[in-house]
Image (cartoon, grey):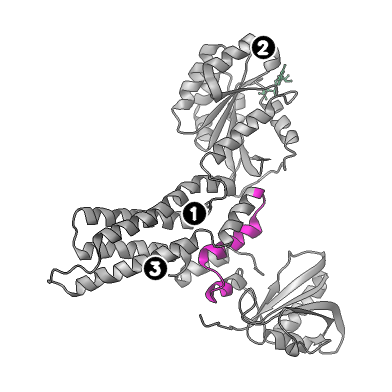
Amino acid sequence: MNILQQEPIAALATAPGIGAIAVLRVSGERAIEITNRLFRGKDLTQQASHTAHFGTIRDQANTVIDEVLVTIFRSPASFTKEDVVEISCHGSEYVIRQILRLLLKEGVRMAQPGEFTQRAFLNGQFDLVQAEAVADLIAADSEATHRAALTQLRGGFSRQLKALRQQLIEFAALIELELDFGEEDVEFAQRDDLRQLVWSIQRVLRPLIESFSVGNAIKNGVATVLAGKPNAGKSTLLNALLNEEKAIVSDIPGTTRDVIEDELFIDGIRFRLIDTAGLREATDAIEAIGVERTRQQLDKAAIIVYLFDAAETPLTELEEVRAELQQRSVPYLLIANKMDKLSEEQLAQWQLQFGNELVAIQANTGNNLDQMTRRLTDFVRSNAVPGSTVVTNLRHYEHLTQTDAALARVLDGLDAGSTQDWLAIDLRDALRHLGELTGEITTDDLLATIFSKFCIGK
Ligand code: GDP
């Protein structure tokens, strides 16, 4: 691939605000030469790639703006594959502004959000899935999101899909060739081989598609509704959980949300505890999961945790609750609280009746809480194969499902002995979705949408 060196751009690569040091990144044609004009120290234009040089940045009046360390990366051995200079200066907003101003005077322009990564993508540094993983990695705020992003950054599923897409292109070309022969009854593309190929692509696609529910949970947090009658011990449990797990408790005043949520990290997985005010207010258990407001909360849930006072709740009541919960296709956990008020026998009775749907705890001492949290993480992990790639991005998920659907139509067509033109349409459709997924097919709109979500300097 030819490396394209575009007009030089610059931006602050580190977080804005005051810090010990800040890094300004310049990329593009003449990036080294331009920086050299502001720099007093060694002649940067004569230095090898991947070397760091101490010196000063001066303005036109030769006033020292700052002492800096300049690292140069020569094309193509850089993040963008262009010439890149990283200027490490002191993290003062004044210094940053002055250096940027000097760069702009020399003909550098301010980078758009994600423009560095976009250039890296256009120069073949990585595919689109990996480029998006850069953004995810930067945004990662838990161990699980970090792991998912890193796997994708390292090539994840896109390399495998690219190879399969290449094979599919060859089949599509043969089918198109058959079309050229029009009336003549020729078959260049071996139908059985095509079928095999479609199957092998589907074998790659399906686990990825299925991983999205987990991936989405990992990325956006698992919506967890904590329900139960007043006095069941919900507040006590919540406090115990938040302390026990040394959770980062944060209020997310979402722009589109009016509820406040607590966040809880268990084993690197983020659980979003959805405000259950509606549930706390209701007086009757059945009413509690029956009222409209509560229903709306439950509809948002990925997991429902139903807490009850084990000493005060008749068996029949809990059976009714369970019947309600079973009508939803959402996993639920029945938590028998206040186990200290129960005899061993009574406890055994609950266990017998509800098996592993039930965990008995003592919220006010935190007893058995670990068993409950383990059950929660199991729900999330049960679908995820350790070490496998997890799809976290909605755009990827949509292209994967569309490809799968198109391939299913190809198989149907093969079974029904469809004519070449029908097969060709479905193959093209599958190829297009696969290509858009990895970025082998792109449109300016698509790139603009993806990269505009990045922050400036990335
Ligand atoms: P909420 O209305 O569901 O939020 O319930 P609270 O968290 O306010 O708890 C109600 C009462 O039950 C409080 O007096 C708690 O101290 C008490 N409580 C909570 N958990 C336990 C427990 O495990 N054992 C006992 N004996 N009391 C508990």
Q: Which quadrant would the C terminus be assigned to in this image? A: bottom right
Q: Nearer the viewer, residue 155 or 141?
A: 155
Q: Which mark is residue 67?
A: none
For residue 146, above or below residue 169: above
Residue 19 shows in the view: yes
User: Which residue is labeled 1 in the image?
Assistant: 394
Which numbered disc, 2 or 1, marks the residue closer to the eye? 2
Q: Nearer the viewer, residue 446 or 440?
A: 440
Kind of residue indicated by mark 2:
Leu
Expressed as whole percent of the image width and height from the top left, the position of residue 3 reads 55, 82
Q: Nearer the viewer, residue 357 or 16?
A: 357
Place residue 435 in its image quadrant. bottom left
Main SS class of the magenta portion in the image: helix
Which residues are drawn in magenta?
119-143
Which numbered disc, 2 or 3, marks the residue closer to the eye? 3
Circle 1 — which element? helix
* Ligand 1 lies under 8 Å from the Cβ of mark 3: no
Place residue 235 in its image quadrant. top right
Expressed as whole percent of the image width and height from the top left, the position of residue 428 reads 32, 65
User: Are discs 2 and 1 less than 8 Å apart at CB?
Assistant: no
Mark before the other along the chain sequence, 2 or 1: 2
* Ligand 1 lies under 8 Å from the Cβ of mark 1: no
User: Which residue is labeled 2 in the image?
Assistant: 342
Q: CA distance from mark 2 to mark 1?
A: 47 Å
Q: Which mark is residue 166?
A: 3
Q: Is residue 120 magenta?
A: yes
Q: CA distance from mark 3 to mark 1?
A: 24 Å
Which numbered disc, 3 or 1, marks the residue closer to the eye? 3
Q: CA distance from mark 2 to mark 3?
A: 64 Å
Q: Quadrant of ligand 1?
A: top right
